[in-house]
């Protein structure tokens, strides 16, 4: 290796030479490597001087590998490809303990965070990273192993799916708001009250009209209703006494148990859909991702404190 170090003092010159030889164009090689054309030319000339051989044939407007350069380029390309593959495998192994979960802000803050200490206790060697988005991400394109989605598995044929919780929706309010209206209202009177509406920009969600129709009550959205496009903010508004909102049971159970939120009326809508943890069919999960997936499924019930 000492002889190799004297022969090739700069390993970066081999990377420059590989790109220049692959393109047979110093300008395109420079663009790929984020260098100037002059820097590529200088690196190649330095390498030629070190080796004592012309690696390129040069004309006024073009360069091409010489016979010697072509043989050397084949060996360099093969060697760098093996190094790159090995480095990628080492990096992937080093990241195996890191698992990313794609989810909505509501799921992340209202379902995941109350359970995060339990996850750390159960899986202390795994670093869970939660990536929130207003839309369902393409997990394979984004390089994310796990995601949370609501709906039907038939909607996602490219994914495996395991159910976390059924979709169950009721009406909820703060005790202060219920007190301000003189107690829990009759279901038929609820359309006249101050209802808070969720309108997410991308994901579809059950709305007040659907909820009332499932109870056999006609409902028309009033003029200038309170509309919020983030469910976390909807629940914050309810907690602040601003009105009544639809509550997804798997998200608001902690607030119901604590008494911060109370059910309004006795009508509950089970939509027949559910929330699932999903993962791409075309990618094998790492051991850590499988453990997180299994933990999520096992934790789909009551929160264990």
Image: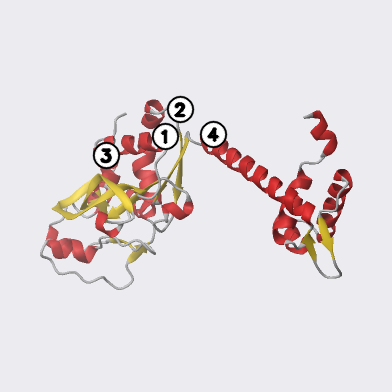
* Label number found at residue 300: 3
Above/below status of 165 relative to 153? above
Q: Residue at x 25, y 57 (%)?
A: 154
The nearer-to-camera label among 2 and 3 is 2
Q: Residue furthest left?
A: 216
* Label number found at residue 172: none
Q: Residue at x 27, y 71 (%)?
A: 222
Residue denoted by label 1: 288
Residue 261 appearing in the image: no
Find numbered disc 3 in the image and state the secondary structure of the residue it sits on: loop
Q: Is the image coloured rainbow, by chain, by secondary structure, or in one colour?
A: secondary structure
Q: Badge 1 local density, few (<14 within 10 Å), some, or many (20+)?
A: some
Using residue 176 as the reference point, say whether residue 287 is left or right of it. right
How far is the residue under mark 4 from the one under mark 1? 12 Å
How far is the residue under mark 4 from the one under mark 2? 12 Å
User: Reading the chain from its start, which is encountered first: label 2 or label 3?
Assistant: 2
Q: Badge 4 local density, few (<14 within 10 Å), some, or many (20+)?
A: few
CB under 8 Å between callouts 4 and 1? Answer: no
- Give how far across and how far down residue 189 sits, in percent: 15, 62
Above/below status of 109 relative to 42? above
- Depth order, front residue of 74/167: 74
Residue denoted by label 2: 125
User: Reading the chain from its start, which is encountered first: label 4 or label 2?
Assistant: 4
- Give how far across and how far down residue 143 sits, in percent: 47, 49
Using residue 150 as the reference point, say whether residue 1 is left or right of it. right
CB under 8 Å between callouts 1 and 2? Answer: yes
Q: Residue at x 61, y 41 (%)?
A: 82
Using residue 7 as the reference point, say whether residue 71 is left or right of it. left
Residue denoted by label 4: 94
The nearer-to-camera label among 1 and 2 is 1
How far is the residue under mark 2 from the one under mark 3? 21 Å
């Amino acid at each position: 290796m000492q002889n190799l170090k004297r022969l090739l003092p700069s390993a970066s010159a081999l990377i420059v030479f590989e790109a220049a030889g692959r393109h047979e164009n110093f300008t395109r090689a420079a663009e790929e490597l984020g260098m100037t054309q002059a820097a590529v030319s200088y690196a190649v000339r330095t390498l030629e001087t070190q080796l004592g051989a012309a690696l390129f044939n040069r004309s006024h407007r073009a360069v091409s590998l010489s016979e010697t350069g072509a043989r050397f380029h084949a060996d360099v390309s093969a060697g760098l490809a093996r190094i790159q593959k090995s480095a990628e495998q080492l990096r992937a192994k080093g990241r195996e303990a890191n698992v990313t979960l794609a989810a909505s802000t509501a799921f992340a803050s209202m379902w995941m965070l109350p359970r995060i200490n339990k996850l750390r206790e159960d899986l202390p060697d795994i670093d869970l990273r939660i990536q929130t988005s207003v839309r369902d991400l393409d997990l394979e394109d984004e390089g994310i192993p796990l995601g949370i989605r609501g709906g039907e598995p038939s909607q996602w044929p490219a994914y495996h799916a395991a159910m976390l919780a059924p979709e169950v929706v009721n009406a909820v309010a703060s005790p202060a708001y219920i007190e301000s209206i003189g107690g829990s209202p009759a279901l038929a009177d609820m359309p006249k009250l101050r209802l808070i509406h969720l309108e997410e920009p991308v994901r579809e969600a059950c709305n007040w009209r659907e909820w009332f129709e499932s109870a056999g009550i006609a409902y028309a959205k009033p003029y200038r209703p309170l509309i919020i496009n983030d469910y976390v903010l909807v629940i914050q508004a309810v907690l602040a006494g601003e009105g009544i909102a639809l509550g997804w049971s798997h998200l608001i159970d902690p607030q119901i148990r604590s008494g911060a939120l109370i059910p309004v009326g006795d009508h509950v809508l089970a939509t027949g859909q559910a929330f699932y943890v999903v993962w791409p069919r075309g990618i094998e999960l790492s051991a850590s991702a499988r453990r997180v997936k299994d933990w999520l499924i096992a934790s789909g019930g009551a929160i264990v404190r």
